[in-house]
Image (tube, rainbow, N blue to C red):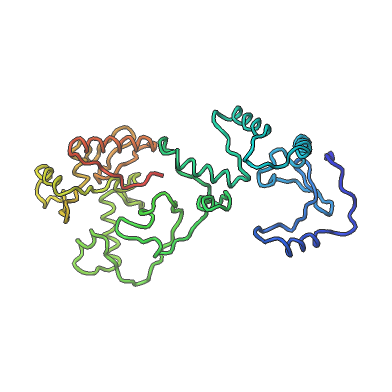
Amino acid sequence: MKEIVPAPPAIVRNESAEIQSLFQQNVVPSYGRFDLVLSHGSGSQVWDVAGRRYLDLGGGVAVLALGHSPRAVTDTLIEQSRKLVHISNFYYHAPQGRLAQALVNLIAPGKCFFCNSGVEANEGLFKLARRFGHDEGRFEIITALNSFHGRTLAAIAATGQEKIFLPADCQFEYRGSWFKKNPNKYVVTSFQIQLQPHGKATITYPDAQKHFDKIPSLADLRQFIIQTRDSKGYLQMPGYESFKTAGSFFKNPVVSAEQFEKLKPMLGDENLNRYWLMPAGAKIAAAFLMQEAGFGKGYREGHVGISPKHSLSLVNFDNATAAEVKIMAKKIKAAVFEKFGIMLEEEVLYV
């Protein structure tokens, strides 16, 4: 391999221990460091104090896009250091203006914000996106798993790391959880279920409470749950018909007492389970509203439709795109609103 710069002179004694001792005595250990003491570099290579050469694949944590000690940069720094090293942001000076102009010409119309580090740039971008991105729907921050964006509060909060939730942390309840109350914060990638041998059945599931007049055996409860989920097309088990669905797509809307009185003639008798009275109004069955608006079981447009087993389930019949599912949902909401004056709300979360 051709030598870009000459190797350093032979070192009589290894300075690594001495330099590491200086750090241990005088530098706050805010970073975990490799057992490597570097001396100098050129291009994509660095040398340690013992003269060993290394290929630098980190580029100074993605800072040295031009490599170590590029001649154009070092010459410019030397030249500028003879004029001005620092004058703060209270004054104008030509180099910063010319740099901003060059960046604008290379990137896009706009203005530059100069800061001291990558994390400051990230912090500024987070705030700008949250402040000005809502009109275009571009205000959420997406990060990669095990990523690192700096040590400011916002950058740490935007760092994608795995988190383990204990059962109490999940706050599970019927059709609810911590994840549902705090949407778009985490994606569940795996879970563990702990079963208790010969344990007592729990029938908090409303359909199970209606079906059993006493605590059933675990086997009986399991069979009932399988039958119930199968009847709705939700069961993902060999031998059963299932559909690509996220379950109930819309919530049952709650209306005021005044609005309920206007709707009551269209809803029929209470025993039909099309509504449920509440202290301040009523909860209306979204499935009934959808059916009356023209979107009943088995309805289909292209790759998307309504499950033939469950009126509230939007189904991906054949490689539908997310856009097609959202278009279908939008049509259903518009039709229900036009007929009943009720705006349905999605129960699913878009990812």
Q: On the picture, is 107 further left or further right than 263?
A: right
Q: On the picture, is 152 further left or further right than 140?
A: right
Q: Indicate the position of residue 333 as horizontal and vertical percent values.
A: 26, 38
Which residue occupies the foreground of this view, 71 or 331? 71
What residue do we see at 30% from left, 65% from top?
219
Give the total number of marks visible in the rendering: 0
Q: Quadrant of the N terminus?
A: top right
Q: On the image, which quarter does residue 343 sit in?
A: top left
Q: On the image, which quarter does residue 63 sit in?
A: top right
Q: Quadrant of the C terminus?
A: top left
Relative to 212, is 229 above or below? above
What residue do we see at 56% from left, 29% from top?
108
Q: On the picture, is 139 further left or further right than 257?
A: right
Q: On the picture, is 238 further left or further right than 83?
A: left
Looking at the image, which residue sits at the far front?
A: 91
What residue do we see at 78% from left, 38% from top?
82
Q: Indicate the position of residue 132 as horizontal and vertical percent values.
A: 45, 38
What residue do we see at 34% from left, 38% from top?
317
Q: Indicate the position of residue 185 as horizontal and vertical percent values.
A: 43, 51
Q: Indicate the position of residue 160 as horizontal and vertical percent values.
A: 52, 51
In this orientation, does residue 319 appear? Answer: no
Which residue occupies the foreground of this view, 17 or 301? 17
Relative to 156, is 134 above or below? above
Relative to 18, is 10 above or below? above
